[in-house]
Image (tube, grey):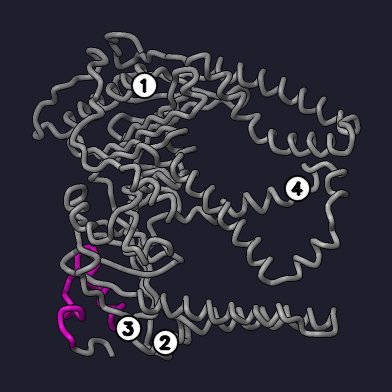
Amino acid sequence: MGPAVTTPTDQVIWRQANPAYIVIQFFRNVRPMVLPFAIIFVSGGARGGIGMDSWYLWITLAIGIGIAISSVISWRFFRFGLSDRQLLVRSGILNKQERAVAYERIQAVNIEEAPLDRVFGVVRVQVETAAGGGGKESDIQIEALRRDEAEQLRTWLGQARQHLRQEASPEAGPTSATPGTGIGETIPDEGELIHKLSVGELLLAGATSGRIGPAAAIVGFGAQFADDVVPQSMWERLPWSDVASVVSSVQTVFLVVLVLGLVAWVLSVISTVLSIGGFEIRRHDDQLLLRFGLLDRRRLTIPVRRIQAVRVVEGVLRQPFGLAELRFETAGYTTESGEHGMLLPILRHRDTARFLQDVVPDFAFDPVAISLRPVPARALRRYVMPGAVQVALAVTVVVAIAWRVTGDVQDWSLYLYLLVLVVAVYGWLEFRDAGWHLEGDRLVMRGRTGARETVITRRQRLQHRRVEANWFQRRARLVTFRASVAAGGSGGGLAIANIESGDGEYLLAALAATPRFRFPNPTASSSDFGR
């Protein structure tokens, strides 16, 4: 970035990324080809040679050379520039692009480091704006900056944003940093330490995370290619007749499934540890600073004033142990990575109120002590019956097909009807957990989508709200209440189904931007409101 820089209004100082950009972009573009190439290479070797697939090697080599040339050209044409009022980025070879972000529109400047970035001593800078929505089109990403350059750029953008906002609101007082006179000192990463994840908490988060599903998929995907990876001679030496007799045992099948599940669970623990290892959250002025990641190191900045809602997520493995995860919805924040919505990966459920009071007091509440208004008892069948009936019909079709093909109903097919019971129990859990609470302008809603989620927001944060009901709900005097807050990506939706129609009308009126009258609060008394 260099030392002091003067930027007149009509002048833009352009800079180029570090040459490491070429290598990083090359490996990033080549990465999708590694797995299919490895599969073909290994399977060809197991069959006694790769000559029959040599055409793939030549095509891969040609593509690799093309990607290398493209990476060099991409680096040559990538530029970012600083003026006194905006950040500009130019990129593209044939389809040239130039994007500009006014300093006062910048919400956060995040710094990320992938393993390959650390090899070359560079980082990636992500500039977040209020437009949000996924980052690729509305935000700016600058690759391959040296760490000191990235820190200086972040400081410059922070000073420029503050200066321009002071110009727009002179009554707020003078600012201590003025862009144009120099890069200035780096914004401190320290600040007040709020929480740092211990090793025990990290392992507990991994052991109770919901990543076992993707890990199991990886195990299953690898098993599909076992016949290609293992040499044919080894397969032929296996005593398949004995294996067939063993596999017929239900206990053995259960043991195999248990072992595969254990492997998937271990992979999920490792994945979680790599993703959130070294997690810490600090507060500096009105911003939260998050650091986490052992491989991809991330430093995220969350403006507290932009937070629209907080979610307390109790996973299936965490709820029985009184554990939860805190997530946030914030205007303009990208959600291209699941961790971008993470406020705290794991904490004791009973400690939620204290943590929120320290971090985001506007959303502080006690999810243990709060009394939610439940959905009416007559809504139970609407939570249980639809899913159970659909699964029962699907299982019946499968059993009928099996009987048609084999001429007999297999014992295993009857066990499928246990899925109906599982779905019915899940529907009952949805009914039991559903509820809402409105106190002043603070709205709390609880529901279940696999994990139990409690969402808290404020009336001023709501973008829209509506009440809807299908024909069956109207007959039962039930409605579904929906609302949303401003959030990046596909987040921000709030909903609770099958509440009293009177409750829905109350929420609709009480949460209006400028309510003209006030309904009696059904949570404030035990009266049969709206029934």
Q: Residue at x 29, y 41 (%)?
A: 302
Q: Label 3: state its secondary structure.
A: strand
- How packed mark 1 is, by other alpha carbons closer than 10 Å (few <14, some 14-19, many 20 or more), is many
In the displayed structure image, the side of residue 216 where residue 61 appears, left or right: right
Q: Which amino acid, mark 4?
A: Ala
Q: Which amino acid, mark 1?
A: Ala
Q: Which amino acid, mark 3?
A: Glu
Residue holding disc 1: 150
Q: Quadrant of the N terminus?
A: top left
The mark nearer the N terminus, 2 or 1, is 1
Q: Which amino acid, mark 2?
A: Arg
Count every numbered label the image shows and give the total: 4
Measured as percent of width and height from the top left, residue 265 is found at 52, 53
Q: Please tell me which residue lies in front, 4 or 163.
A: 4
**Residue 520 higher or lower than 442, as above or below:** below
The mark nearer the N terminus, 3 or 4, is 4
Distance Cα–Cα, label 4 vs label 2: 55 Å
The mark nearer the N terminus, 4 or 2, is 4
Distance Cα–Cα, label 2 vs label 1: 57 Å
Q: Which contiguous range is marked in magenta?
A: 500-526
Quadrant of res 273: top left
Q: Does residue 57 appear anywhere in the picture?
A: yes
Label 2 with label 3: CB-CB less than 8 Å: no
Measured as percent of width and height from the top left, residue 521 is found at 18, 78
In the displayed structure image, the side of residue 488 where residue 259 appears, left or right: right
Q: Residue at x 25, y 20 (%)?
A: 186
Measured as percent of width and height from the top left, residue 183 is found at 27, 15
Residue holding disc 2: 474
- How packed mark 3 is, by other alpha carbons closer than 10 Å (few <14, some 14-19, many 20 or more), is many
